[in-house]
Image (cartoon, rainbow, N blue to C red):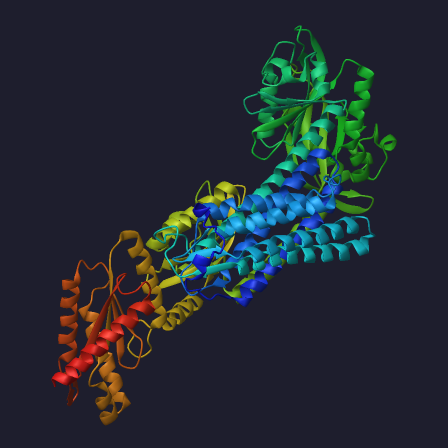
């Protein structure tokens, strides 16, 4: 028991002096709110668990809920402990603190598994819940470390456990009732149950805390060495953050597993074959239909080379590679009749459609259609042909009449399929348009080279439309030079053209708005390093505008040397991850001026687009405000805020390195008479001069602050011994005793000095100031007596 700092009150122990305790009401309220909120989330989760579609999903929800609720109870407990004060430092053993989570999770499991444990009596579940909460509380209490003796009052100890069990009974009873109620009443029941459960947890905690008595005496743990309250807060936040991340990751994994399994089930149930392969040609997935086509098992398909499964002309194993190359060149999908090689080396005709699975260009999908049944293949081909979104027209090479059209072409040309088959361009378009189209068709047929005709105007049903057409010659067979048909792949871009014209107008308006807002727009080509700047970019960077694009090096050389690496890191991250680029940095202009720039950008392909805003005025104003908030307005020395921050940093560093910190308290001796006799203006001049002398006397790593009218503090760091401090005090006394010339007026001030040292004289700045002030006062009295 001693190891866990757990003992009951005895008559002998009661003879010691009792240390009074009190609570921070804000933290008490926060702890109760945490308990009720955690309980509410738990009871809400119970309905989610009961509505889960399968047992495994219920297990996942139950684990997540009990873990999250348990950590919520645990967090409430330690927030309540942080509210507890006895006037002496209290520390916490982190290992014991973390171990106390286990009974809290156990108690939470009783709540979220109430339906699963329905065969267990309500009283037994309440008892387990109460014991779990009590165990968490008293294990957590044993984590407390202080230079005092802790003991528990037996009646209150038992009362805390009984209260936890009884209120747990009421909460679980309300939870069981609300699940059977109507939806509206269920919400009220959940609120009541969670409130009771939160009060059960809170009541048990604070009754348990009341049962703990603290007496003066040596700690049973020896030397006091434990985590502080701030460190405990960090542990609580870390545990809450870790549990939240774990919950999110678990739910994400669950979602991905469900999605993967459902996708695999769908792909396995369809009749078409699907093969997924990587850039090396290795098969990574095949559905059941594909495995049947090749007379293999699904697991036998994986890790095979797809070029050994699909060939062309019965022998060529480079067929897949040629189709993949077309995809990488920008084609959305490629279809080709190939031959599949079965396990017995026999071959069968198959229509293969290759597409990119992702933008990374590392994964590909091949859709397989068995062409053994030609009638079925014709139906399939016609279906695909008709449902492609692009307008497709096939012309005979001999007379350029239409032989095939799909449904999209019917919509584009404004005529049905039966009316289009057999006619020529002269029966569909104006004579001038038909002559132009026929000339380009003839050129493609004669050259055998595909051509792209962009935004060609044609008149359809009396309206001018703009059509972009890719014209592809279809040869009689792969080895032939004779073109049998001409394929049109057309897209009506009339709306796109109109939208582009409107976009030009919008861009013009945006440019005018940017000029008014002084925004600089830029574009960066990551491959060529060319920068395109608008007029405002040239003004911001004070770079003359040239007809040629600005080079990346011009911009890079203008970035402040101290900011360049950070900006480069942010820029590279945006390029690598495709994320947004947001940063702020300084630039050096040719005239020596420094400006602050806020930059935002977004990567699109191999180009980044963004804006720059000159925020120099705002940043300078913020820096000046920051300086003034940390500086004494009269002397320019550090004020109390800056002194506190300096001392906190140096004390933390001293704790790591084991060095000492000296505090020198300086009070001017003859300042008040000067101020009274010559006025505040002369007094201010004297203080300014004193500040200059102090600043020039100490080192740059030290801190000089003014904390009162004629009171100054010097914090010395990295001092090897008291001799150095004595020497520094002598120098300060010599400098402050020297006459001060103020025009025709010469005055003498002098000072009384007191010192203290960390950690001997105090653990914080206030303690050090008290000791140094007392010594300064003693020196002042001694100096006055000697006079």
Residue 476 visible: no
Up-down relation of residue 577 to residue 152 (above or below): above
Residue lying farthest to the right in this orientation: 418
Residue lying farthest to the bottom in this orientation: 677
Up-down relation of residue 754 to residue 232 (above or below): below
| Residue at image location 17% in from the left, 73% down from the top | 732
Up-down relation of residue 217 to residue 737 (above or below): above
Residue 582: percent from the left, percent from the top?
Answer: 49, 53
Please give left or right for residue 369 compared with residue 532 in the image. Answer: right
| Residue at image location 19% in from the left, 80% down from the top | 780
| Residue at image location 77% in from the left, 28% down from the top | 385
The number of discs equals: 0
Residue 665: percent from the left, percent from the top?
Answer: 24, 73
Please give left or right for residue 527 compared with residue 631 in the image. Answer: right
Which quadrant would the C terminus be assigned to in this image? bottom left
Residue 781: percent from the left, percent from the top?
Answer: 19, 82
Compare residues 192 and 471 and report the one nearer the observer.
192
Residue 362 visible: yes
Up-down relation of residue 156 to residue 423 (above or below): below
Please give left or right for residue 63 compared with residue 269 in the image. Answer: left
Q: In which quarter of the image is residue 318?
A: top right
Residue 271: percent from the left, percent from the top?
Answer: 77, 22
Compare residues 420 and 350 and report the one nearer the observer.
350
């Amino acid at each position: 028991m001693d190891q866990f700092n757990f003992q009951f009150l005895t008559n002998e122990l009661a003879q010691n002096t009792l240390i009074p305790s009190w609570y921070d009401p804000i933290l008490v309220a926060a702890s109760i709110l945490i308990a009720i909120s955690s309980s509410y989330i738990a009871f809400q989760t119970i309905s989610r668990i009961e509505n889960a579609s399968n047992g495994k999903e219920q297990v996942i929800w139950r684990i997540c809920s009990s873990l999250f609720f348990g950590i919520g109870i645990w967090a409430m407990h330690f927030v309540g402990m942080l509210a507890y004060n006895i006037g002496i430092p209290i520390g916490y053993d982190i290992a014991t603190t973390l171990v106390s989570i286990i009974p809290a999770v156990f108690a939470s499991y009783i709540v979220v598994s109430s339906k699963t444990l329905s065969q267990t009596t309500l009283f037994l579940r309440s008892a387990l819940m109460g014991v779990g909460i009590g165990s968490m509380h008293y294990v957590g209490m044993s984590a407390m470390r202080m230079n005092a003796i802790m003991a528990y009052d037996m009646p209150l100890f038992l009362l805390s456990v009984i209260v936890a069990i009884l209120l747990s009974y009421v909460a679980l009873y309300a939870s069981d009732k609300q699940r059977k109620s109507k939806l509206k009443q269920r919400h009220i029941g959940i609120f009541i149950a969670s409130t009771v459960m939160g009060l059960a947890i809170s009541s048990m905690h604070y009754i348990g805390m009341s049962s703990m008595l603290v007496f003066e005496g040596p700690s049973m743990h020896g030397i006091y060495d434990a985590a502080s309250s701030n460190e405990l807060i960090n542990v609580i936040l870390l545990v809450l953050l870790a549990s939240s991340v774990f919950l999110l990751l678990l739910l994400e994994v669950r979602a991905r597993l469900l999605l993967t399994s459902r996708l695999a089930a769908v792909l396995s149930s369809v009749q078409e074959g699907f093969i997924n392969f990587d850039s090396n040609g290795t098969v990574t997935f095949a559905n059941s239909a594909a495995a049947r086509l090749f007379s293999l098992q699904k697991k036998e398909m994986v890790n095979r080379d797809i070029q050994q499964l699909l060939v062309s002309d019965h022998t060529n194993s480079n067929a897949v590679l040629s189709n993949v190359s077309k995809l990488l060149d920008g084609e959305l999908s490629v279809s080709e009749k190939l031959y599949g090689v079965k396990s017995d080396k026999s071959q069968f005709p198959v229509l293969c459609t290759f597409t990119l699975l992702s933008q990374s260009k590392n994964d590909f999908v091949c859709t397989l259609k068995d062409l053994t049944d030609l009638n079925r293949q014709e139906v399939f081909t016609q279906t695909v042909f008709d449902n492609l979104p692009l307008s497709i027209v096939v012309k005979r090479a001999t007379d350029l009449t239409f032989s095939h059209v799909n449904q999209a072409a019917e919509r584009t040309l404004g005529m049905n399929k039966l009316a289009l088959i057999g006619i020529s361009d002269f029966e569909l378009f104006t004579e001038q348009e038909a002559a132009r189209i026929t000339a380009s068709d003839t050129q493609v047929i004669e050259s055998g080279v595909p051509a792209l005709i962009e935004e060609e105007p044609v008149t359809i049903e009396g309206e001018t439309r703009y059509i972009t057409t890719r014209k592809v010659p279809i040869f009689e067979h792969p080895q032939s030079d004779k073109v049998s048909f001409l394929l049109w792949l057309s897209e009506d871009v009339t709306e796109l053209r109109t939208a582009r014209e409107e976009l030009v107008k919008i861009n013009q308006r945006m440019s005018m708005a940017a000029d008014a807002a002084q925004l600089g727009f830029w574009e960066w080509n990551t491959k060529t390093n060319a920068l395109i700047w608008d007029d405002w970019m040239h003004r911001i960077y004070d770079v003359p505008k040239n007809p040629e694009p600005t080079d990346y090096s011009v911009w890079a050389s203008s970035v402040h040397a101290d900011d360049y690496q950070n900006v480069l890191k942010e820029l590279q991250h945006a390029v690598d991850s495709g994320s947004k680029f947001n940063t702020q940095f300084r630039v050096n202009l040719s005239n020596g001026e420094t400006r602050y720039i806020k930059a935002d950008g977004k990567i699109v392909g191999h180009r980044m687009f963004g804006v720059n805003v000159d925020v120099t005025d705002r940043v300078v104003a913020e820096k000046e405000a920051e300086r003034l908030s940390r500086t004494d307005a009269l002397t320019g020395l550090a004020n109390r805020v800056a002194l506190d921050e300096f001392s906190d940093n140096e004390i933390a560093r001293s704790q790591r390195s084991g060095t000492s910190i000296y505090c020198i308290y300086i009070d001017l001796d003859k300042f008040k008479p000067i101020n009274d006799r010559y006025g505040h203006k002369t007094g201010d001049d004297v203080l300014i001069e004193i500040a200059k002398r102090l600043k020039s006397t100490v080192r740059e790593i030290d801190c000089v602050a003014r904390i009162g009218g004629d009171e100054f503090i010097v914090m010395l760091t990295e001092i090897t011994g008291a001799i150095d401090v004595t020497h520094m005090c002598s120098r300060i006394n010599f400098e402050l005793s020297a006459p001060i010339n103020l025009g025709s007026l010469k005055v003498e001030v002098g000072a009384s000095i007191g010192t203290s040292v960390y950690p001997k004289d105090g653990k914080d700045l206030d303690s050090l100031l008290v000791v140094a002030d007392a010594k300064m006062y003693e020196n002042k009295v001694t100096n006055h007596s000697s006079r």
